[in-house]
Image (cartoon, rainbow, N blue to C red):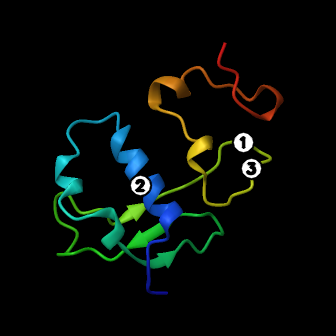
Amino acid sequence: MDRAIAPNEAAVVRWLLDHAPVGDVTACRIHPVEELRVVKGCDCGCASLDFQPHAWGGAGEIVLLEIYDCHPGASHGFPEISNLWSFKEGGRWSFKEGGRDLQ
């Protein structure tokens, strides 16, 4: 597999960078997300993606997007932005009725 990142995949990567709960991700924005090349998907069937690094996967290089569903009835497909929530929102999420329970 060697293909350009799809628009919906790029949108999810940008959303994740915008909502990153860990430190400064400025270095990860040096190269436009739209330039990422998908070189591998996960063998287990999840929607995780490996990207071709620009230079050996150094600091600031996005080389992997690991996606896994914690919900037993999850689709295991690539997520839509509407199904993502920030770290702060995630603390209020529950498995009640298979979705968000944001009191």
Residue 31 falls left or right of residue 6: left
1 or 29: which is nearer to us?
29
In percent of the image, x 49 and y 66: which residue is there?
A: 7
Between disc 2 and disc 1, the foreground one is 2
Density class for disc 2 (Cα within 10 Å; few <14, some 14-19, many ≥20) is: some
In percent of the image, x 66 and y 43: which residue is there?
A: 70
Q: Which residue is mark 1?
A: 71
Marks 2/1 in contact by CB < 8 Å: the verdict is no
In percent of the image, x 66 and y 69: which residue is there?
A: 45
User: Furthest-right residue in view?
Assistant: 97
Measured Cα–Cα span from mark 1 to mark 3: 5 Å
Q: Position of residue 21 (x, y in %)?
A: 34, 33
Q: Secondary structure at mark 3?
A: loop
Q: Position of residue 71 (x, y in %)?
A: 72, 42
Density class for disc 1 (Cα within 10 Å; few <14, some 14-19, many ≥20) is: few
Q: Which residue is mark 3?
A: 74
Q: Secondary structure at mark 2?
A: helix
Q: Does residue 40 lie above or below 89 as drawn?
A: below
Density class for disc 3 (Cα within 10 Å; few <14, some 14-19, many ≥20) is: few
Residue 65 falls left or right of residue 78: left
Give the residue type at disc 3: Ala
Q: Secondary structure at mark 1?
A: loop
User: Furthest-front residue in view?
Assistant: 7
Q: Does residue 83 lie above or below 96 as drawn?
A: below
Give the residue type at disc 2: Val
Give the residue type at disc 1: His
Q: Position of residue 89 (x, y in %)?
A: 52, 25
Between disc 2 and disc 3, the foreground one is 2
Q: Position of residue 82 (x, y in %)?
A: 61, 42
Q: Which residue is mark 2?
A: 13
Measured Cα–Cα span from mark 2 to mark 1: 21 Å
Marks 1/3 in contact by CB < 8 Å: the verdict is yes
